[in-house]
Image (cartoon, helix red, strand yellow):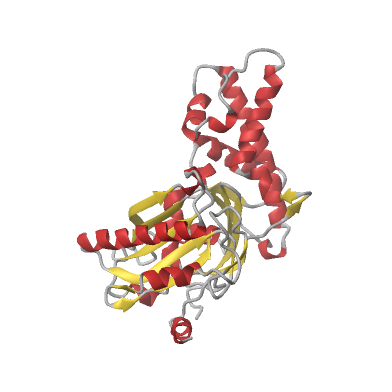
Amino acid sequence: MVKDIQFREAGLAHAAQRLPSVVVDDYNIELKDGDGFIGDRVSKSAFREMLEACRDSLRALGPDPLGDKKSCDFSKRRLDQILVADDPLASGVVFSAIEGFGQELARVVKIFLNQDGWAGTQAIVVGGGFSDSQVGCLAIGRAGVLLRAAGIDVTLEPIRHHPDEGGLIGAVHLAPAWMFAGYDSLLAVDIGGSNIRAGVVTTNLKKAPDLSRSEVWRSEIWRHRDEDPMPSRDEAVDRLIGMLSDLIRRADRASFSLAPFIGIGCPGMIEADGTIKRGGQNLPGHWEGDDFNLVERIAAAIPRIGDHATMVVMHNDAVVQGLSEVPNRQDVTRWGVLTIGTGLGNARFTNRGADEP
């Protein structure tokens, strides 16, 4: 109880609506589409299914221009290479999947824009692993063209940071400005359906007081989706705690001054007490419900950073990745983020005015 009071007095809260730079208007919308969700139309697996459908139509007429390799086994890099290779038919197959995905993405964006929490959205950034490829950028660009052609005045473009880094850099916008007094870095965690990443983010406040020069100094990744058998929840948490402890040691050896703060992005609807209400179904083990609190587990394992008690703040992972764009979205008032990965993350923001308390 004492810790809860201290936490609130510090001006920090899990899944807070009002953050230092923005108001989180909405996030983690789960819109139904028949037996599934709208987001299933534009996931990473949805693109592979579109690619496979294009190949199926050609197999009935002759050899598959992409060979015998399964669509799900093509890496993003390899698909990018096929786009500019000398085989026009193979390139055309990939372009066909891009076109189909771009159309679906435009439809999904229209549905989001019709939600109350997304009214008046002026710009949307698209993050997640899919945006980290030429294929993904072309699909995003095509969706943006379709939206403009339909008379919808919204900018749609890829997130500026590498998605892996954006999910960590956004954590600096979870912490109040006073947290950085005397510190030059903090710990950040990005939990996803395929992997868990932890890193040290340097704020570089002397170069840019608006945190626009924040960057990942070092990070560690664990691909839990590749483990066989799938790790349990407790094994995943222990692995994360080990990663954070290692990063603390590395930062100390490098003479960084870590703030006593850990910012976490995690899938799902996050409650004010740090529990996950829903949306954690892709994580290893069962993370939802009142019987598990990741924040408390981490705070108990890492009670202090330097000379001060550790504060741990958790928000939805799409919110945190979107926060990395805060310095780049000062030309608009209302903007959103969609993250395309194992699922479709989403969040909508309103920038807070400089004169707002």
Q: Residue at x 35, y 53 (%)?
A: 219
Q: Nearer the viewer, residue 53 or 147?
A: 53
Q: Residue at x 57, y 70 (%)?
A: 291
Residue 188 located left or right of residue 267: left
Residue 185 screen position, x and y as percent:
32, 65
How many labels, in total?
0
Residue 237 screen position, x and y as percent:
45, 60
- State whether residue 152 appears in this view: no
Q: Nearer the viewer, residue 345 or 24?
A: 345
Relative height, residue 313 to residue 51 (above, below): below
Q: Nearer the viewer, residue 262 or 114?
A: 262
Residue 306 screen position, x and y as percent:
27, 73
Residue 247 screen position, x and y as percent:
31, 59
- State whether residue 249 appears in this view: yes
Relative height, residue 8 to residue 212 (above, below): below
Residue at the farthest right position: 34
